[in-house]
Amino acid sequence: MKKILSLCLLVAPSLLVAQEQADSITTHRLNEVEVVADYLRAQPQLSRSSVSLDKLPLSISSLQVNQLKNRNLYLPTDAIRFIGGGSGIGKSYGAFLQLNVRGFDYAPISVDGMRDERTTFNSYPLSDLSEVESLELLKGPASVLQGHSAVGGALLLSRRKAKAQKEIEASLNYGSWNYMRASALVGNYLGAGWSGLFLATYSKEDGWRDLGDKTLKLYGTLNGRWSKDEVDIRVSHNNDFYGTETGLPPTLSSDVYTTQGDQLYLKAGEVEERIRKNRSVRYNNSSDFMYHRNLNGSVRWVHTFTPQIKLVEHASANWDDIDYFSTEELNYVTSNKTEYAHYFKGKGGKKQYIDLSRVQFTFPLRFEHIAKTFQNQLTLDAKFYTGFIKHNLTSGVDVSYMRRVTYKGYNLEGSDPDVYGITQPWIVSAYEPKGVGELKSKFSKASPSHTFSSGFFVQDIWEFSPQIQAMTALRYDLYSYRSSGDIAVADGKHSFQDVDTYPNKINDTALTYRLGLVYTPIKQLSLYSSIANYFNPDRTFARPNRIYIDNSGNEIEPKAGVGLFKPRSGYQIELGTRATPLKWLELSASVYHILQNNTIVGLGREVRQVNGKDVTYSLTGQIGQITSQGVEAEAKLSPIEGLNLSFGYSYTDAKYGDNQIDKYRKKNENDGIIKPGTAVDGISKHKAYSLGEYTIQRGLLKSLSLNYAFSYQGERRIRQNHFPAYTLLDLGIAYQIVQNLRLSANVYNVLNTESYQEALGNQMVPNRPTNFRIGLSYKL
């Protein structure tokens, strides 16, 4: 609370000065046409393209962050609800985010055109969107120039740029579960061609299920403009705390019966009724935590040789630290004896008795990821003619290097475990958990790695006439990965002896292409088609008690230090249209087909005899294909002054295709095989959204705004967990109290829909029930 008050005190003098100046400024009323144009036709900040969207054969969904801020929403998970393209974002363990687009997960995320290489390794936290101006989702073939692993799409975040004018903004929020947030921004022209902007945001909350999240973000940028040069410098820092989230006690894969009377008590996959009705209860331990600290900076220089030739040099550095310790695995206490009130049937129909009143912490996980990333992009844009054909040529090279060290505290056994302080077993009540007490932890292993990637690309937009344009693009990628395996940590913290040569090595290269055509029969309508291939390198090395199957169905004989699987590869095809039949209406639609080869999946377990003993092995196979096809449609309209509406719908059919695992299955019985036609985990077939806002333009209620936000998520399946379809509806109201000062209130999940965001194994994570926020904001 002190930090929030401090921010308010810092910004208050600026607000007073700004209000005095604002009173002397003449107010100009925009007519209806100008307002509509601003809402509908804001051009996306497309990376690596200086050509307007109507000449590009690509599909893009965009969202201005102000649409979220007007509803007192600030998180990436809020934004993805209202971006089309069959997109979704999984949130696990309280903060880790994983983007999926058109049926494929781990979609790349770029900030100001710089790709975040961390997202190709794991799910990662993304801080709030305080400094972000817009989000664009490049879909299908459009994502290829973003580099390796760009299948389905890529998310682009564009941060705010300093302007040569005075900017002052401030906001305060309060909401359910003691949510508090304060933000302040100042910007102005500094002289000698330079403009500056600085932003500070702090938030805290007790939180739904007592998560207790806290975030702090600082962002500063300088922009210098002269006759032929522009320099943009940006620095950002966030220091966030997340309480972590382990979910509810696990659902069971078998029906549960009463010991007395053998009555069905709980169906497989169901959450016990007493737990479901009290979903706000938190099962994490009091010692759980996650800190996310990040510091990044970038410099971008643009030199204009002539109006037709431009050079762009962009360099960035990023330091990222994720420090994590959390209760992850919950298990009920079981026994072979008749000592508990319920039982289920295990393998062979044997009864296993279960105590549903208690759960055990069986694997609290301790790790820390520290990643240092350095990137550089050099791009040359040139516009010229060959005969009657106009060319818009973009060529360049990008280089990325990331050193990532993972510190592990996974050892829970022996005389010197990594997690200690309370003697095992760690057991708590399933209905009123109080935690097991203060657990302490240390690191015993470190696993450093180096990732280097470089891409050379060239793209040309051919303008044959105002009606016909074509795109050709090529990209050549080099990908190199080195890892050491586990190295002993000397002090339980970060001290370890690095090795000179990393034994695990992967080197891949690939040539990818993109071809497209745009046809504009009339000014209000354009049709386009595009095709592209892609590749996704794999970093799987042999591990103990694992069996690996190649894409021909044969067992792989692992070799030390050699990657086991081929890169995933395939192609993407898209047909689409954009139309502006009326000046206040904008429509878009597309259909697509994506094929991925060399898909890697888990295939269950297998028991083998080793030295006369049964040993259980996990199976992983590069068994075949995933196909994804779908339809997407979006509309934006502003039929009357003050009314802005947007709608979106997507249908995504992502499933496993043919595979060669039958060849292996004939030799080895296994019940974990994924059959052709099985839907891909976590992907909804149907997604829909709508955003609307109406501001009264005249009369006694002038400046009163009403808004809504609607989203529909179709049913999903993650492993054996079924997630029913659900609808979320948010309603809001806002009023311009005096010039530049706005008061707002929003109610989220008005229908109090009961739904689940994710499952950690069989542990379901419930979404928030009905809640509210109020906000007070100032903008000059």
Image (tube, helix red, strand yellow):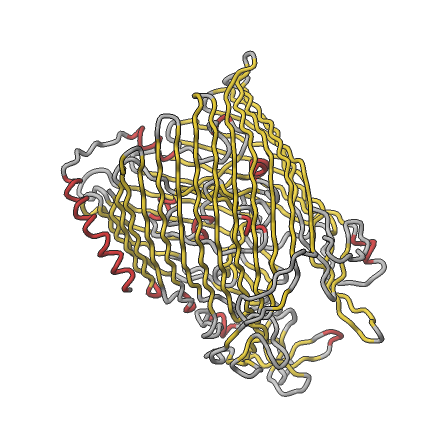
Of the pair 297 and 766, the residue shown nearer to us: 297
Looking at the rendering, in which quadrant would you find the N terminus?
bottom left
Depth check, front residue: 16 or 576:
16
Q: Is residue 466 left or right of residue 700?
A: right
Residue 23: give x, y in percent of width and height: 14, 40
Quadrant housing residue 739: top left
Instruction: Tell how many labels.
Output: 0
Looking at the image, residue 430 lies above or below residue 79: below
- Residue 591 is at least partly visible in this image: no
Q: Quadrant for the C terminus, please.
A: top left
Question: 428 or 227: which is nearer to us?
Answer: 227
Q: Please state the horizontal and vertical placement of residue 41, each as a whole percent of the image.
A: 40, 32
Image-based side of 684 in relation to 639, left or right:
right
Q: Residue at x 64, y 60 (%)?
A: 499
List x then y, in percent, for residue 461.
55, 24
Q: Relative to residue 530, is residue 16 depicted above or below?
A: below
Q: Residue shown at 48%/29% (left/top)?
A: 311
Residue 730 in sight here: yes
Residue 580 is situated, as x and y percent measured from the top left of the image, at 44, 28
Q: Which residue lies furthest to the top in this view?
A: 387
Q: Is residue 347 above or below residue 645?
A: below
Q: In this view, does 300 lie to the left or right of 196?
A: right
Q: Which of 273 and 60 is in front in this view?
A: 60
Residue ID at (32%, 58%): 181
